[in-house]
Amino acid sequence: MRYEEKAKLTAAKVLAPLAILVASPVLLMAGGPVRRRYLRYVYRDGAPAILDKEQGRISVHWFVVMSPLLAWLCWPTETLARLISRRGQSAS
């Protein structure tokens, strides 16, 4: 969507956190892997940029990636994964 489309930008700003809240049970249980897979999809080779200043375009993905709510909901499983990987390295 374009920067000039204020209604679409406002809708994306409101609906992205709502979608994250709806998915919050899943994110609390498996947020780390889900978030990593989503970021790989968004930043894959050949994917359109989520923020293109030259074209004046912004993707809905930008609102999701930049959401502190998503990072907060994925924090427990990401921390747990780090702890498990550290214990696996120290046991070897």
Image: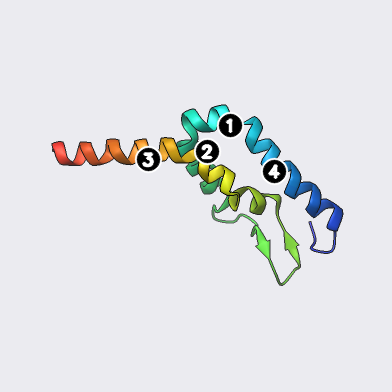
Q: In terms of sequence position, does the residue under pointer 2 or pointer 1 come before the other? A: 1
User: Is disc 3 surrounded by few (<14), some (14 to 19) or many (20+) residues within 10 Å?
Assistant: few
Q: In terms of sequence position, does the residue under pointer 2 or pointer 4 come before the other? A: 4
Quarter holding the C terminus is top left
Tag 4: residue type? Ala
The residues tagged by marks 2 and 1 sit, at their Cα atoms, a distance apart of 7 Å
The residues tagged by marks 1 and 3 sit, at their Cα atoms, a distance apart of 17 Å
Side of 72 where 60 appears, left or right:
right
Q: Find disc 4 in the rendering and name its residue.
A: 16
Side of 10 where 34 appears, left or right:
left
Mark 1 and mark 2 in contact (Cβ < 8 Å)? yes
Mark 1 and mark 4 in contact (Cβ < 8 Å)? no
What is the x, y in percent for residue 29? 48, 28
SS of the residue under disc 3: helix
Q: Find disc 2 in the rendering and name its residue.
A: 73
Side of 88 where 21 appears, left or right:
right
Q: In terms of sequence position, does the residue under pointer 3 or pointer 4 come before the other? A: 4
Residue located 65% across and 54% down the image: 62
The residues tagged by marks 3 and 4 sit, at their Cα atoms, a distance apart of 24 Å
Residue located 35% across and 37% down the image: 81
Residue farthest to the left, as pictured = 92
Q: Find disc 1 in the rendering and name its residue.
A: 24
Quarter holding the N terminus is bottom right
Q: Quadrant location of residue 38?
A: top right
Q: In terms of sequence position, does the residue under pointer 1 or pointer 3 come before the other? A: 1
The residues tagged by marks 3 and 2 sit, at their Cα atoms, a distance apart of 11 Å
What is the x, y in percent for residue 91? 14, 36
Tag 3: residue type? Thr
SS of the residue under disc 1: helix
Tag 2: residue type? Leu
What is the x, y in percent for residue 59? 70, 54
